[in-house]
Amino acid sequence: MADHPSLADAHIPDFEAFWPFYLREHQDPVNRALHVAGTGTALALLATGAVTLNPFLVAAAPVAGYGSAWIGHFVIEKNRPASFKYPLWSLRGDLRMLRLTVTGKLRPHLDAAMAPA
């Protein structure tokens, strides 16, 4: 996997180069499930908080999203969350992974990311 970008690299040039790295950091299905659940819960809290004008729900959204994701990284994958170095790309990756999981289209992306370079 030496040809794949990693957080140790000086610079990952764009999101499409980041995406395979992101997927390799989420190899464990339990970690992915925690991310999907956390991202979905965060989106629901944001939407509900916006509709009801409840600032507590809006404030709880990042706690729900990042809390479950970080448990997945520190406890299950035993790696450092990409959001520490690439926060916006990591959020975009969470949203893409949620969409692809819900639509049943994540597997080809995972297979491509895990394939030897």
Image: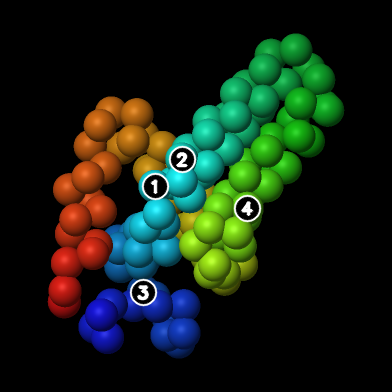
Callout 4: SS: helix
Could you tell me how far apart the alpha carbons at marks 2 and 1 are, in whole angstroms?
A: 6 Å
Label 1 amino acid?
Answer: Pro
As drawn, which residue projects farthest toward the top?
52
Identify the residue at image location x=25%, y=80%.
1
Disc nearer the start of the sequence (3/2): 3
Q: What residue does disc 3 label?
A: 13
| Discs 3/4, front | 4
Kind of residue indicated by mark 4 = Ile
| Rendered location of residue 30, percent (x, y) | 46, 46
In primary-sequence order, the first of circles 1 and 3 is 3
Closer to the eye: label 1 or 3: 1
Q: Are marks 3 and 2 in contact (CB under 8 Å)?
A: no
In the displayed structure, 113 sits above or below 66; it is: below
For marks 3 and 4, give the CA distance: 28 Å
**Residue visible at 18% across and 59% down in the picture:** 112
Pointer 2: residues within 10 angstroms few (<14), some, or many (20+)? Answer: some
Residue 88's tag is none
Q: Which residue is mark 1?
A: 29
Q: Secondary structure at mark 2?
A: helix
Query: Circle 1: is it few (<14), some (14-19), or many (20+) Cα within 10 Å?
Result: few
User: Picture quarter containing residue 105?
Assistant: top left
| 65 sits left or right of 91 in the view | right
Instruction: Give percent across and percent down for residue 21.
Output: 36, 67
Q: Please name the residue shown 33% across and 35% down the image.
A: 101
Q: Which mark is residue 71?
A: 4
Residue under pointer 2: 33
Mark 3: amino acid: Pro
Residue 5, image x, y percentages: 34, 77
Quadrant housing residue 63: top right
